[in-house]
Image (spheres, helix red, strand yellow):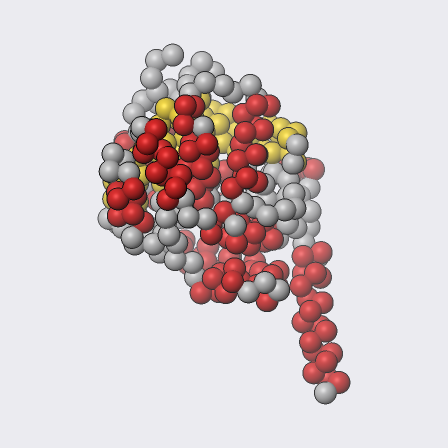
Amino acid sequence: MIWAGLLVLMLLAAWPLAEALRRPMAARARSEAPGEIAALPRGRTHLVWEGPAEGPVLVLLHGLTIGSHMLDRLAGGLADRGYRVLRYDLYGRGFSDRPRGPQDRAFFLSQLEALLEARGVGGELTLVGYSMGGAILTAFAAAHPGRVRQLVLLAPAGLGQTPPRLADLAVRLPGVGDWLMAVIGGVVLRRMARAADRAYGLPGTLIAAQGVETRYRGFLPAVLSSMRHMLAEDLSGAHRRLAEAGVPVLAIWGGQDEVIAAGARAGLAAINPAARQLLLPEAGHGLPVTHADAILAEIPAAPAQ
């Protein structure tokens, strides 16, 4: 009985201890990162500008776990097409801060709105969002339809996801889920990254970067909070508002996507028949990396200013 009690105590202690032993984001890492750091009300945000200074602004936003560097190829291609591309790391990822609080729609919209204000970005925007980034930009576009020239969604969340069993368990069970994420979440994410590499041939730099991310303090709690809040939101209402406002929407899906629910594409078609949709039959969820050229071919060149 005593040994059982000690075992329980050790297991409980592993939760805060595992997170405390992870290293904080180092000032040196930030200083060596490309781009710049914006001091926003909720925390510092890492951002990168690419493309002609006079080009129309395009916001390019990453997904749940890998920061903005995942979208290097897309950013370069869009800059070559004349856009002034703004990429940034969501709170909890990349070189941005890890502020506490539920990572819900309001949390992420406040970061984007504060960033645009801090950098004096006004006027119409083209928005390109991947996975959870697509959900965030959908919510932003629904809140500010007059500011959106076009919304491009790449395997977007918000209309149904199929998370792995362990992730689903962590989301649904407070306490137990937090323990699972803190103690074994990093191991699981690193294994998933290696599996994706084997399946889709992702660049080794991305796999290595994901491994580094999992070892920073604040990253795993941020991922879990996003799964429990932002990714748990049904964005049908936001898509309905975009349809009513006449905002042009392009959605690109992967035919082999193991993350987004199979019915999401049909769901969008039912809500917004005017949305243009494209299915890449051989693409998985990593389509911004594996099918960047096909995506770029569907996005028109920047309009003349």
Q: Quadrant of the N terminus?
A: bottom right
- Classify 285 as above or below 244: below
- Is residue 236 left or right of 220 when viewed as pictured? left
- Classify 121 as above or below 18: above
Closer to us: 128 or 172: 172
Residue at 71% x, 67% y is: 13
Residue at 48% x, 27% y is: 86
Q: Residue 36 at x, y = what percent?
A: 60, 28
Q: Residue 54 at x, y = what percent?
A: 45, 13
Q: Quadrant of the C terminus?
A: top left
Residue at 41% x, 23% y is: 146
Q: How many marks?
A: 0
Closer to us: 43 or 271: 271
Closer to us: 247 or 179: 247
Residue at 37% x, 20% y is: 82
Q: Is residue 300 visible?
A: yes
Residue 224: image quadrant is bottom right
Q: Residue 80 at x, y = what percent?
A: 37, 23
Q: Residue 251 at x, y = what percent?
A: 31, 39
Residue 104: image quadrant is top right
Q: Is residue 51 visible?
A: no
- Is residue 178 left or right of 200 when viewed as pictured? right
